[in-house]
Amino acid sequence: MTDKVLKSFGDILNAVKDKPPKRVAVAAAQDDAVLEAVQAAREQKIAEFTLVGDIDKIKAVADKLGVSLEDVKMIHEPDDRKAAYRAVALVSGGEADVLMKGLINTADLLRAVLNKEVGLRTGRVLSHCAVYEVPGFDRLLMVTDGGMNIAPSLQQKADIIQNSVQLAKVLGINPAKVAILAAVEVVNPDMPATLDAAALAKMADRGQFKDAIVDGPLALDNAINREAAKHKGINSPVAGRADILVTPDIEAGNMLGKSLVYIARGKIAGLVLGATKPVVVTSRADTHEAKIMSIALGALLG
């Protein structure tokens, strides 16, 4: 955990570089974008890597891209699913600190993460948490879960909150201010998201979340904008100051996240949380910078 609040991606990079490089195990590493990110992360001393996959293909891709594999440990496993299990085993066995997805289906990677013998299970649901640096904001914004849980139950939302709060702590945000989003800021029995939000807020009042202040339901405007919250007469330590935005379902999380990137011109990094160690799962649509920052975020948490 850092001693200061990290407010930008530059802060995250500096915090990671101040520590010894973490070890990242990459499953099915024979991927152009992944190997380019690996080289950049090594050059910036963010992390060290073990590449698990088809070594011939890894070398061919590296040669094509001009990526140096000098001093990079490689494990030959041409079968993608077996490569996932071997990469997970490196993490669960203490030989790596972070797991990273290569050229493999996310479902196959997460199946290995949840394996009862070599996996990284904690008992909490796995969830995706994205961190955004948005122009005009004086802090990083976290959005969860726009990538994994389609329609999370109340208990799953509780796990999603705890997962994201764990990440907030390493960003120096403690306690994290968590807004449970809905379309309105009042409880409406016809709107299930507001009922879940109210229950989660009451759970927080009863001390069921560590290192977090949780409130909801809150609409997006009064969760992140103090003037909007003031105009609505909302008196809450979270309203207008939220660090973490918990969306009611995957559609809302996905659209909010993409709006922050493509409309607000924000930058993104993200992790899968809820395992014993962080999992870097990037999209092929992610920018090169997003991949590097996701690795840095994993290294900070790992």
Image (cartoon, rainbow, N blue to C red):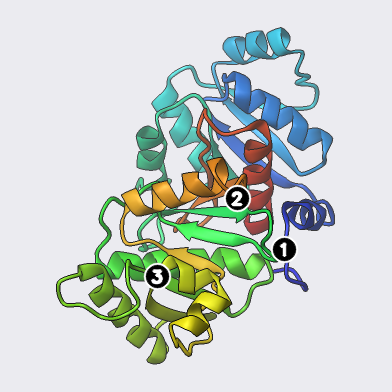
Image coords of residue 186 (percent x, y):
30, 80
Kindly identify the amino acid type of the residue bearing the numbered disc 2: Gly
- Give the quarter of the image for residue 133: bottom right
Q: Using the image as rendered, state which of residue 198 and residue 111 is in the foreground.
A: 198
Image coords of residue 34 (percent x, y):
61, 27
What element does badge 2 sit on? loop
Q: Is residue 289 above or below residue 31?
A: below
Within 10 Å of disc 3 (Cα), the crowding (few <14, some 14-19, many 20+) is many
Image coords of residue 275 (percent x, y):
46, 55
Sequence-wise first label, 1 or 3? 1
From the viewer's perspective, tell me whether residue 71 is left or right of residue 262. Answer: right
Q: In this figure, which residue is indicated by the disc labeled 1?
A: 7
For residue 94, the mark is 2
Q: Can residue 160 be seen by looking at this rendering? A: yes
Sequence-wise first label, 2 or 3? 2
Q: Using the image as rendered, state which of residue 301 and residue 174 is in the foreground.
A: 174
Q: Can residue 213 be seen by looking at this rendering? A: no
Kindly identify the amino acid type of the residue bearing the numbered disc 3: Ala
Tags 2 and 1 in contact by the CB under 8 Å rule? no
Q: In this figure, which residue is indicated by the disc labeled 3?
A: 219
Give the label, 1 or 3, closer to the camera. 3
Sequence-wise first label, 2 or 1? 1
C-alpha gap between disc 2 and disc 1:
30 Å
Kindly identify the amino acid type of the residue bearing the numbered disc 1: Lys
Give the label, 2 or 1, closer to the camera. 1
Q: Using the image as rendered, state which of residue 258 and residue 296 is in the foreground.
A: 258
What element does badge 3 sit on? loop
What element does badge 1 sit on? loop
Name which residue lies at 44% across and 35% down: 85
